[in-house]
Amino acid sequence: MVRRNVSFVMWSVPLVLLAGINVSCSDGRRPVFPVQGQVLFEDKPTPGAMVIFHPVNDPDPRAPRPIARIGADGTFKPTTYATGDGAPAGTYDVTVTWIADVDNQNVSKEDYREPKNGVPDIYGKPDTAGLRIEIKKAPNDLTPFRLTRK
């Protein structure tokens, strides 16, 4: 009887360790798919603007929120885990903010300038932006977002 228990322990311990290694190697990352898009404001590129994808109806509060900085021509490729890697499949509300760089270092109180959003503030909130997309489990070429003054 003792021999059976020893045999069981000898086989079960390595199996448990292997299972633990398998779980610990899983980093919990969701698969991402290539995405490219463009943001235009009044039919002109928005270089330096920021795009954020907000998951819709995702119960996980830690769900990824892919983000992208817009290039000189208005194009972007969102980042989830690595630069320009794309986004997990799903539905997203998209926000856009375009804050110009303002150098307020060594500026007197009178000359201080408040940074301003280059696009209307409604585009900076998921519930008012009106920009909803679906990312598929394939390469995604989004229709350009054409922002206006509304």
Image: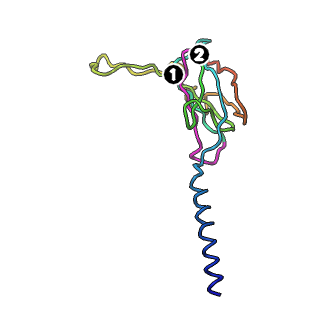
Please tell me in which quadrant of the rendered image residue 147 appears. top right
Image quadrant in which the C terminus is located: top right
Foreground residue among 48 and 129 = 48
Q: Which amino acid type is marked by label 2? A: Phe
- Say few, some or many: other residues with alpha carbon within 10 Å of mark 2 (under 14 / 14 to 19 / 20 or more): some
* Image point (51%, 18%), residue name: 118
Q: Position of residue 79 (x, y in %)?
A: 57, 32
Q: What residue span does the magenta drawing correspond to?
A: 57-74
Q: Which mark is residue 1?
A: none
Residue found farthest to the bottom:
1
* Image point (63%, 20%), residue name: 38
* Marks 2 and 1 close (CB-CB < 8 Å): yes
Q: Which mark is residue 98?
A: 1
Left or right: 20 as drawn, with respect to 137: left
Q: In the rendered view, would you say 108 is above or below 88?
A: above
* Image point (64%, 37%), residue name: 32
Left or right: 25 as drawn, with respect to 106: right
Q: Which amino acid type is marked by label 1? A: Trp
What SS does tag 2 mark? strand
Q: Which residue is mark 2?
A: 41
